[in-house]
Amino acid sequence: MNDLNDTPQSLTALATDAIRQRILTGEWTDGGQLRQDALARQLGMSRVPIREALRQLEAEGLVTIVENRGAVVSQLSLPEIVELLRVRVLLECDVLLEAVPRQTAADIAAAEALLIDFEQALQQRDIASWGVLNARFHLALYRAAERPQTLALIEQLHNRTDRYTRMQILLTDFSERAHDEHCRLLTLCKTKDAIGAAAFLRQHILHAEEALEAWYCQQARALPAKRGRKPRTPG
Amino acid sequence: MNDLNDTPQSLTALATDAIRQRILTGEWTDGGQLRQDALARQLGMSRVPIREALRQLEAEGLVTIVENRGAVVSQLSLPEIVELLRVRVLLECDVLLEAVPRQTAADIAAAEALLIDFEQALQQRDIASWGVLNARFHLALYRAAERPQTLALIEQLHNRTDRYTRMQILLTDFSERAHDEHCRLLTLCKTKDAIGAAAFLRQHILHAEEALEAWYCQQARALPAKRGRKPRTPG
DNA sequence: CTAGGAATTTTTGTATACAAAAATCAACTA
DNA sequence: TAGTTGATTTTTGTATACAAAAATTCCTAG
């Protein structure tokens, strides 16, 4: 599942992974500028592979490039996030419905292992890895459906949305609830209750949406005249 | 809807559009190699913007890049196409359900105009533009849903699948059927029968899938030992 | 004639150099 | 002081040059 130190990849692939990683963990925040020269120095390469990586990440929706103005970490509005979460509901429920009857003991065990990693991360308040673990857990549940194209789309959707879910974890009790829900979801899979699992998954994703909406409302109240800060990504 | 001679775009954007266009029209076929140098000469630029364009198209699923081996036009197996068509069913039906009640007379008129273009293209056996027109017609119906993110995803899915649907048009009576179905779909929208329209859309996409499966079976029978030809893209 | 393997050619990957656009800053004017 | 203009700096866009990998050719041995 992990393509670390596999083969000596091209610098472009290296840069793509490195930048994607830093965005997913939240190290580089929403709207933060991605200066080619800084990235190049930071990763020890020239700007050429950096530029190719940024183009790729743009097509993945993680980066926004403006002509002659450079790249920033993509920033989604609440309605846009809601849209993507609704797409996730459609795709993930459909896939889970097919996956559950085919899940082997090994599939369940893999998901369970990830759930343990998850728990540890939560205990250590390791917010950075929350997003990655969340996506991995979900994808582990779906793998048995044997629909790799669909799974790839779902993974991209997670990459685009999980950052926003992750934000709330620090502040709310959402983390425990999400964990409980993950456990319950896994139990439903174990008992081969595909329909129940899909229905519950739907609620699980919609809960994240609700929490996000609440958080945004609170933010809006706190900052009546929202002044855009300028996050940077120094070399 | 068309961004032709809008502003002097970057060469990368130009190259991306040009290559995407040629893939969508079928000018460059499945598995065809995309030589950087040839493309660069053909488009009158250096290889740098070409490479960036190819990276972007790879993330869009239209191109497959292999390390040190270059890029080819992406090639989907039948199961992969079926997967993507199923995703299309989920997304497009969901969006159409929301779009129909909001469609204005102008929305309907726009779709109708595209349907006329469509008819002309069919009469002239202009297969090349079939894919583009098909995608445009579908997207016109969904626009009223005001879900731009979802529409962008649907557009990408069309870009990846329409080529394969287009292939059959020459050989079968599929073209007329597709046209009839489009007309009927539009009528259902006009009468504000959202549920009926969504159900019909579902069948419409699944018909394309059936036709495709039949075509693949026939192909498999015709070429028992399939010998891979090597399509090229000369400069 | 085929198999294998060096030499050659082609093609891709990356760095550097330079041009063009945007951003920043400074001086100047009203 | 606020705003405008023009020089300066920073940053992006593209071409060229060169290195590395792959594909091809051609030669030789069996």
Image (cartoon, coloured by chain):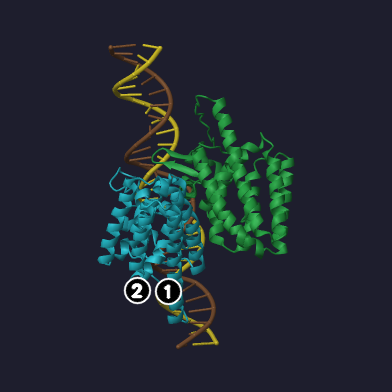
Chain colours: A green, B cyan, C brown, D yellow
- Cβ atoms under marks 1 and 2 closer than 8 Å: yes
Q: Quadrant of the C terminus of chain B?
A: bottom left
Where is A180 relative to B28, above or below? above
Residue B180: name its quadrant.
Answer: bottom left
Q: Tell me, yes or no, if residue B126 can be seen here.
A: yes
Residue A201 in picture, x, y percent from top left: 63, 51
Where is B82 relative to A116, above or below? below
- Residues packed near mark 1 inside 10 Å, few (<14), some (14 to 19) or many (20 plus): some
Q: Tell me, yes or no, if residue B38 can be seen here.
A: no
Q: Are marks 1 and 2 on the same chain?
A: yes
Does dot 2 land on a helix, a strand or a loop?
Answer: loop
Q: Residue A70: which disc?
A: none
Measuring 44% from the left and 62% from the top, which residue is drawn there? B205
Residue A22 in picture, x, y percent from top left: 58, 43
Residue A42 in picture, x, y percent from top left: 55, 41
The number of numbered badges drawn on the structure is 2
Residue, disc 1: B215
- Residues packed near mark 2 inside 10 Å, few (<14), some (14 to 19) or many (20 plus): few
Does dot 1 land on a helix, a strand or a loop?
Answer: helix
Residue, disc 2: B171
Residue A170 in picture, x, y percent from top left: 66, 35
